[in-house]
Image (cartoon, rainbow, N blue to C red):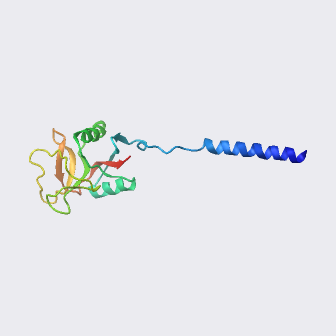
Amino acid sequence: MKLLVVSALLCGLMVLTTAASKRHLVKRSTGCPFGWTRNSDRCFLFVPTAMSWARAERNCLSMGANLASVHSSSEYKTIQSLTAPHGNPKTWIGGTDAPQEGIWLWSDGSSFHYSYWCPEEPTNGQNQHCIQMNYGDSKCWDDMGCDRHLPSVCAKKV
């Protein structure tokens, strides 16, 4: 009789333990992390802390991202919508021509096909190797010295 009671208690304990452990299972999200905004297959995050382009890139890398590359007007509008609540400040995105003057690259390694340069930009002035967005009334792109401290936008694949 005692053996039957002990067996029944053990079976009951195993059922409860299994049920409790299943209750704590968390499904892996296929969306963006909290606070990030999705556009197509990428997630974007505005970082209001002003820092140099290199520090901003390193900050994005620490979150598994890069400074944002822009591949369409839709993506640019998404990024602008993230800066708008902060007054559309001049903001770093991931474009640079630091390796070779006049040849623009994205820090994430993607192709540089879309651009939204301001009129007469990029000027490729001395030490202007990084892209700031929201420049001028048109909120277009300008090449700027990478040491300037600006907010930034990070992007990563979903």
Q: Quadrant of residue 11?
A: top right
- Residue 95: x and y in percent read 23, 53
Q: Residue shown at 33%/41% (left/top)? A: 40
Q: Quadrant of the N terminus?
A: top right
* Foreground pick, 48 / 40: 40
* Residue positioned most to the right: 1
Image-based side of 48 in relation to 139, left or right: right
Q: Residue shown at 66%/43% (left/top)? A: 20
Compared with 113, 37 (above or below) is: above
Counting labels gives 0
- Residue 89: x and y in percent read 25, 42
Image-based side of 119 in relation to 89, left or right: left
- Residue 53: x and y in percent read 27, 55
* Residue positioned most to the left: 120
Image-based side of 27 in relation to 40, left or right: right
Q: Quadrant of residue 127?
A: bottom left
* Foreground pick, 127 / 108: 108
* Foreground pick, 75 / 143: 75
* Foreground pick, 149 / 105: 105
- Residue 58: x and y in percent read 34, 57
Q: Residue shown at 22%/40% (left/top)? A: 73
